[in-house]
Image (spheres, grey):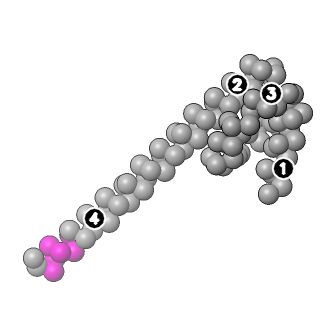
Amino acid sequence: MTPEELEIVENREIAMQDERGRIAYAEEQARLNQTIALVKLLITQRFGELNNEISSQIEDLPLANMEDLMKVFLSFNSLADLESWLQKRLKS
């Protein structure tokens, strides 16, 4: 391969890697958005309409905390339990 051809191949590989990164990021964002929607639906069904502050706090959680929330959600007896859980996550 000539140096020019090698450079073209390397540039294509870099472009493909960049595209894979964008796809992975988009998939993670889609997963997070789906999880947020599901969590908010479950909370609303169990405790009633969420105020904007709680809704925003849930939307701001990283995916790992969102998954933790899904695991502990059924142990909450009230919105106060959820608010307490959120406050602990926001402080860390």
Q: Residue at x 80, y 51 (%)?
A: 90
Sequence-first disc among 1 and 2:
2
Q: Is residue 10 above or below residue 3?
A: above
The residue under label 1 is 88
In this rendering, the label closer to the viewer, 2 or 4: 2
Q: Secondary structure at mark 4?
A: helix
Quadrant into which the C terminus falls: bottom right
Q: Secondary structure at mark 3?
A: loop
Disc 1 residue crowd, few under 14, some 14–19, many 20+, Cα 10 Å = few
Nearest the eye: 18 or 31: 31
The residue under label 4 is 13
The residue under label 3 is 50
Residue 26 spot, x, y in % from top left? 48, 46
Residue 56 spot, x, y in % from top left? 76, 39
Q: Is residue 83 visible?
A: yes
Nearest the eye: 54 or 76: 76
Q: Which residues are magenta?
A: 3-8
The residue under label 2 is 42
Distance in Å between CA atoms under marks 2 and 4 = 43 Å
